[in-house]
Image (cartoon, rainbow, N blue to C red):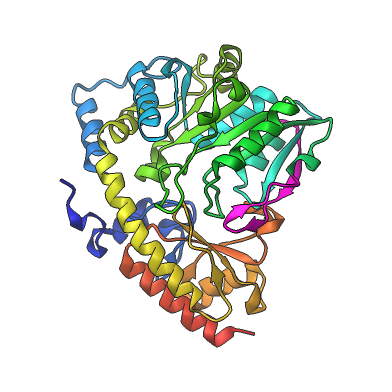
Amino acid sequence: MIDPRLFSDESVNIDALKQKAYNGRWAEVEEGVIPLTAADPDFPVSSVITDAIIDYLKDGYLSYTPHTGLESFKESIARYINTYKDEEVDPKMVLPIDSAARGMYVIAESVLVPGDEVIVFDPVDYLFRESSLASGASITLFPAKVENDSIDLITLESYITKKTKMICLCNPHNPLGLVYSKEDLDHILTIANKYDLWIMNDEIWSDIVYGEKPFISILSLGKERNKKTLSVFGFSKSFGVAGLRAGALYAHEQEIFNTLVEKSHVKTTAGGIASLSQIGAMAALEKGRPWLEAFLTHLTSNRDYGAQRINAIKGLRCRTPQATYMFFVDISQTGMNSTEFAMRLKSEAKVAVVPGISKFFGPGAEGNVRICYATSRALLTEALDRMEDWVNKNLK
């Protein structure tokens, strides 16, 4: 039985967050600023995670684990995905990795060479671009225009050239908060198969999906069609364990799986996921689902409240996210660009948000800011009150 107070206002320990929450959050902002920035919850993790880590430490050993991950962890990942996401993942083809972000770099290094081109949606999380560039590829930006709460893919094929090697898929989409339909995934997969392209399939947000539109994985469209789909899974968004640096890669074909293992450097021990990270993440997958479901209930309430509040502020507009715990807010009517809006909001109203700039999301993000609502209702309310007052005073 999950304690209903788990996501109450009192459960957020700001003193602890100021010591431990980095990446643009509480430990890095000045006193009095409310950070609605990095996609990381303000709540303590489930006790099943901390209990498992403490229990593992009782005998005092922190030895090497198998190069390609604990078998029990690989089995937990496969079982969880197969149970909750209607996929058929073989645990033998799962490679635990030290963060989903690191996994994206490993995929890029495994399939790309200098001169290749990669299709990256614009806007989208910057790691698709950065991982591909690190492998010497060039980026082709595909405008992610939203029509009827879906990304319009009708012109996607026209962006493919003889040099195109890979399409990057973020499902659910960060920062747009959209879930792809089966028809859209089929369209992407048909194009990839037609031109013999790899797909980097990022599903790290696939647990944070609300009831309006269910998550569908591209992997559910058939193993034969997904031979060149390389998937990235993560646990930090679902269970608040970004500090564990725990993720996983999945491939259908043995040859490319072997390449992923090679490029990850796990066999030399230069790469790989820590034992405690595997234990903590495995506990989350095996026993943490009730915590996640309670978290989703809280997020749904914050989402509905936040969207209503933001859309009531003159000059601001946002869609109600189908997934993730971020609002992508159109601020173009304020007369400010994304950088000015975010900098002034932080300095004058003491609320930190992520500006929609190329560095983070691509040029298509300009005119927007991203706001994380994985916090308490009290903090979200205070932040939105400050933002509303500030916008009303400064709307041009």
Q: Residue at x 54, y 25 (%)?
A: 222
Quarter occupied by residue 136: top right
Res. 143 visible in picture = yes
Q: How many marks?
A: 0
Q: Residue at x 61, y 42 (%)?
A: 184
Q: Indicate the position of residue 133 as horizontal and vertical percent values.
A: 71, 37
Which residue ends up furthest to the right in the rendered image?
A: 162
Position of residue 2 relative to residue 194, above or below, is below
Position of residue 69 relative to residue 298, above or below, is above
Image quadrant where one finds the N terminus: top left
Q: Residue at x 79, y 42 (%)?
A: 159
Position of residue 341 relative to residue 142, above or below, is below
User: Magenta includes 358?
Assistant: no
Position of residue 226 relative to residue 48, above or below, is above
Q: Indicate the position of residue 98 as horizontal and vertical percent values.
A: 47, 30
Which residue ends up furthest to the front in the rendered image?
A: 183
Q: Indicate the position of residue 33 as horizontal and vertical percent values.
A: 43, 69
Q: Residue at x 56, y 74 (%)?
A: 316
Q: Indicate the position of residue 378 as horizontal and vertical percent values.
A: 31, 69
Q: Nearer the viewer, residue 212 or 124?
A: 212
Quarter occupied by residue 186: top right
**Left of 226 or right of it: where is 66?**
left
Q: Nearer the viewer, residue 25 or 364?
A: 364
User: Magenta includes 152?
Assistant: yes
Q: Nearer the viewer, residue 72 or 339?
A: 72
Image quadrant where one finds the C terminus: bottom right
Res. 242 visible in picture = no
- The stretch of residues the image draws in magenta is 135-155
